[in-house]
Amino acid sequence: WKLQIPRRKSKLHCLQPRNIQLLQHEWHNGMHPVPAGSIADRAGLSACTKCPPGSFANKKGSKECTKCPAGSVCTNGASEPTKCKAGTFAIAGSSKCTPSPPGSFVDKTGSTSAKPCPAGTWSGKGAAACTNCEPGTISTVGSSACTQCPAGSIADRAGLSACTKCPPGSFANKKGSKECTKCPAGSVCTNGASEPTKCKAGTFAIAGSSKCTPSPPGSFVD
């Protein structure tokens, strides 16, 4: 005998072809609806088809799979989309969440894109939040690492986007300095100095000076 499956206009159903006896039994008792996560896209089928990665079917008896929405992922045979966790995102039709690239972050579940880290912060791959740059370092927008301030300048607190030059009368002789050092007596330090400059013979300077002072009449500096 042959098993004839009629075409139907109602919701499509499919049979699970485990063996011929079971097919006969199911036929006499009515066909079974396609389970969620699978479809039967035309009449006369004997097996269901799982929705491919990047799509889903959330109802029994579905005729077609639905594209996975942005911010979620759908694995093979998915019956529901799964939202991406913080630190990851997904475009529509995705089967895997994408970690945020270095210099960016994703702070909410179900996100569709990553956002760049603001100036003064940084992040590595898959970050849910950006981290402030430490004192002595700075960063621009979208940075994956902080940069040390050059000698002659400082960053006196965390989360800064620009270094500040040492004011006249002070200096910073190392990269990544947090504070300027007062210029010693006998030397001067101009704006943004990385090292003190000793005064020449005939001049002098007290601590914190930016200019050497000539010796007054009746005195000398050797």
Image: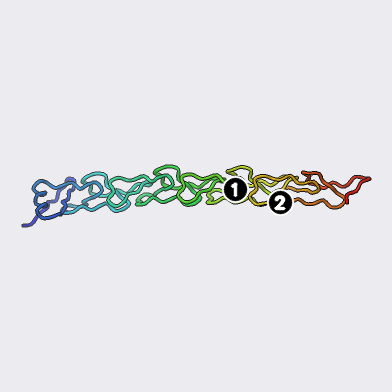
Q: Which residue is nearer to you in this view: 202 or 116?
A: 202
Say which label, 1 or 2, has the lower sequence index: 1
| Residue for point 14% across, 47% down | 31
Q: Secondary structure at mark 2?
A: loop
Which part of the image, by quadrant, shows the N terminus?
A: bottom left
- Residue 165 — which label? none
Pick out the residue farthest to the bottom: 1
Residue 179 on image: x %, y %? 67, 44
| Residue for point 81% across, 44% down | 206
Where 154 falls versus 20 (above or below)? above
**Whether label 1 touches label 2, CB < 8 Å:** no
Residue 105 on image: x %, y %? 47, 46
| Residue for point 24% across, 50% down | 38
**How far apart are the two marked residues, 1 and 2, measured between alpha carbons?**
18 Å
Pick out the residue farthest to the left: 1
Q: Which residue is mark 1?
A: 138
Residue 145 on image: x %, y %? 55, 51
Q: Nearer the viewer, mark 1 or mark 2?
A: 2
**Label 1, residues with CA under 10 Å away: few <14, some 14-19, many ≥20:** many
| Residue for point 59% across, 43% down | 158
Q: How is the image coloured?
A: rainbow
171 left or right, relative to 65: right
Q: Which residue is mark 2?
A: 194
**Label 2, residues with CA under 10 Å away: few <14, some 14-19, many ≥20:** many
Q: Amino acid at mark 2?
A: Ser
205 left or right, relative to 122: right
Q: Which residue is nearer to you in this view: 114 or 173?
A: 173
